[in-house]
Amino acid sequence: MSHPYIPCCADEQQEMLDVIGAKNVEELFRGIPRHIREMANDLEGLPTAMSEQDIVEYFTALAGRNRASGSDSFLAAAGGRHYIPAVVDQIVQRGEFLTSYTPYQPEIAQGTLQAIFEFQSMVSSLMGMEVANAGLYDGATSMLEAVKLALRVNKGANRILLAESLPRRAREVVRGGLQWFPELQIETVPFAQDSGQLDYSSFSTEQLANVAAIVVGYPNSFGVFEDIAAVRDKMAGSKALLISYTTEPLALALYKSPGALGADVAVGDLQSFGVPLSYSGPWCGFMAARSTFIRQMPGRLCGQTVDSEGTRGFVLTLSTREQHIRRDKATSNICTNNQLLALCVTIYLSQYGKSGLKQLAFLNLDRARQLREELLDVGVELRFTGPVFNEFVVSAAECRSLGEAGNRAAHLLERLEEGHGIMVGPLVDSSDESLRDCFLISASEMNTEDSVHRLGNAIRSIVRAV
């Protein structure tokens, strides 16, 4: 017998709000910006129905206004461009992958389960960890889930340390996700003005008391690699978990893995590996960890086994988030993973292999070196001395011909895009006054030597002309 859906009444709503600790629905959703909550009021002006031909023409014209399609792009902030082999799209568009559902029934989902298993294996290897889950939504939510894992492991600890050099939006996701735990203290660890790495004077046995986790970027939002081994040494005697956050995983084909340097949990985003930018989403988050924490990991884990006839097969080994099984002991409310994007990552890595990925990383490193030399030649200075890969911060503070201090970087980026069709940036997202005339820039295999020279000539002409 089916039962009709009966919405809760006002008294029931208030009872739930009382348990949560919110006065009303407005307070419950205060984390969502007001202009988004009121967006429904703007939908009344939508145009009337259109024919298929009209819709195609409309969106074709709209796409033609997109400058990025014909621009040289040196955009950074974890949104750098990488080439995606055609085989990635061809395989993910197969019906058995594109329309597949959660693989609860292994007998009819072996292809999906094997893809998950391979994804987990590749992430574990790349991060230097013993286990990885089937994936998460994006880097910011994976950081939040890692912090929650640390709180479960270190029961009673009420402090979380986030490096100031982590992306601001990721830090905001962590704060938003933990806002209903008022006993928690989320603190920010400053960065050193010279290197762009953590200010290690913030670490001592006393300063790490009651800390559940320390989260650092690898690389951080400045493109600088934190010295994870040094952080690990500073944490001697502390039970806090060391969590690394990576948004440019290609760098790990050359740099030591977080696990090899002493991290307990590695999270981040794998967009670089075959996932298109798509106007900032969707992305493909990941989590890898020491095997000690396997039952505290969110989401699901796929395992390899054999059937009664000895044939290799794949199953969902752990689904620790399942509320209907674990109820209040569920590790998170994550119901699935970005499986289609995880498949993109798996195909991409399979195509390149270890040696191919390393060659690609060397190419990115070389392009970034050429870019730095070009920028230094035209008078744009590097801001930090810490080690970088293909993304870094530069300062236009000394380019006095660009106008008043504080507006010079913004003026330069605007002139590059408007006058030369070259996209660079964004501006560094920081409240630190010393970074107000700084911007991020990156180079990848998509940037040729000629495009790097064009950028240098464009900056030279702008600085001289202003």
Image (tube, grey):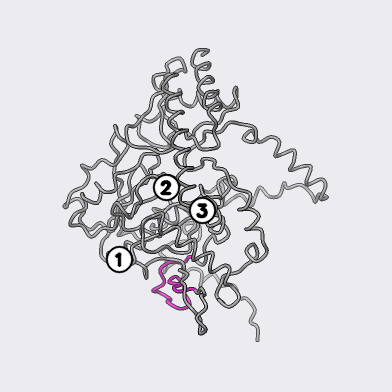
* 114 sits to left or right of 238: right
Label 1 environment density (alpha carbons within 10 Å; few <14, some 14–19, many ≥20): some
Magenta range:
316-334
Name the image quarter holding residue 110.
bottom right
The residue where tag 3 is placed is 349
Pick the quarter of the image with the N terminus: bottom right
Viewer-nearest of labels 1 and 3? 3
Q: Secondary structure at mark 2?
A: helix
Residue identifier under label 1? 153
Residue picked out by circle 2? 253
Q: Within 10 angstroms of label 3, few (less than 14), some, or many (20 or more) residues?
A: some
| Front position in the image: 64 or 289 | 289
Question: In the current view of this chain or complex, which residue is farthest to the bottom?
Answer: 1
Between 212 and 185, the one lying in front of the other is 212
Going by the numbered disc 3, the residue's amino acid type is Leu
x 42%, y 16%: residue: 400
Between the C-alphas of marks 1 and 3, the distance is 32 Å
